[in-house]
Image (spheres, rainbow, N blue to C red):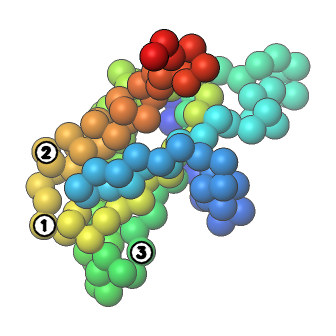
Amino acid sequence: MLKILQVKKSAEFQKISKNCEKFYSHTVLLLSAKTPQIYLHNPAKNNNALEFCRVGFTVAKTVSKSAVQRNLAKRRLREAFRKLAPSIAKNNFDYVVIARKEILNADFKKISGDLKFCLSKIHANKINPANHVK
């Protein structure tokens, strides 16, 4: 079972945003990067950590000046990710989900659909130009 851990520190958000793949949808922007090696080893048990992914959520003041609306958007994103993660999220990856302004008028089904679309597209196999035959 894939465990979901949270990204909370600003420095971690910045590291993920520097070395990431991005994918946009109508209501969210998804950033994805491999989890750093330091999180993959459990020194207490001297073995590798269990299956997990880390996720952080960002809803800026540009989305809404109201903290109530930003918190509502963040709760919706958390719940949508929690439902989708076991089936779509990859093991040992970090994700940052950034809300866009359109999230305020979207219903939960739209937000969940956009997040599912981004998660599936960000891990889709890309064509390697060196192997591509003309």
| Residue 104 image position (x, y, % from top left) | 19, 68
Left or right side of 47 for 52: left
| Residue 83 image position (x, y, % from top left) | 30, 34
| Residue 92 image position (x, y, % from top left) | 62, 28
Q: Residues within 10 Å of mark 3 (few under 14, many from 20)?
A: some
Residue 87 visible here = yes
Q: Residues within 10 Å of mark 2 (few under 14, many from 20)?
A: few
In the drawing, what numbered circle is on residue 55? none
Residue 66 position by quadrant:
bottom left
Residue indicated by mark 1: 105
Q: Find out whether the residues at labels 1 and 3 contact each other: C-beta distance under 8 Å.
A: no
Instruction: Identify residue type, mark 1.
Output: Asn
Instruction: Identify residue type, mark 2.
Output: Lys
Q: How far apart are labels 1 and 3 at the CA level? A: 16 Å
The structure residue drawn at horizontal position 21% and vertical position 66%, both measured from the top left corner, is 102
Q: How far apart are labels 2 and 3 at the CA level? A: 22 Å
Of the numbered discs 2 and 3, the one sitting upstream in the chain is 3
State the SS at label 2. Answer: helix
Q: How many marks?
A: 3
Q: Find out whether the residues at labels 2 and 3 contact each other: C-beta distance under 8 Å.
A: no
Residue 45 or residue 127, whichever sits in front: 127
Residue 64 or residue 33, whichever sits in front: 33
Residue 63 or residue 134, whichever sits in front: 134
Q: Is residue 15 above or below residue 104?
A: above
Q: Is residue 33 above or below residue 8?
A: above
In the drawing, what numbered circle is on residue 60? 3
In the drawing, what numbered circle is on residue 109? 2
State the SS at label 3. Answer: loop
The structure residue drawn at horizontal position 48% and vertical position 22%, both measured from the top left corner, is 127
Left or right side of 58 for 116: left
Residue 68 position by quadrant:
bottom left
Left or right side of 9 for 21: left
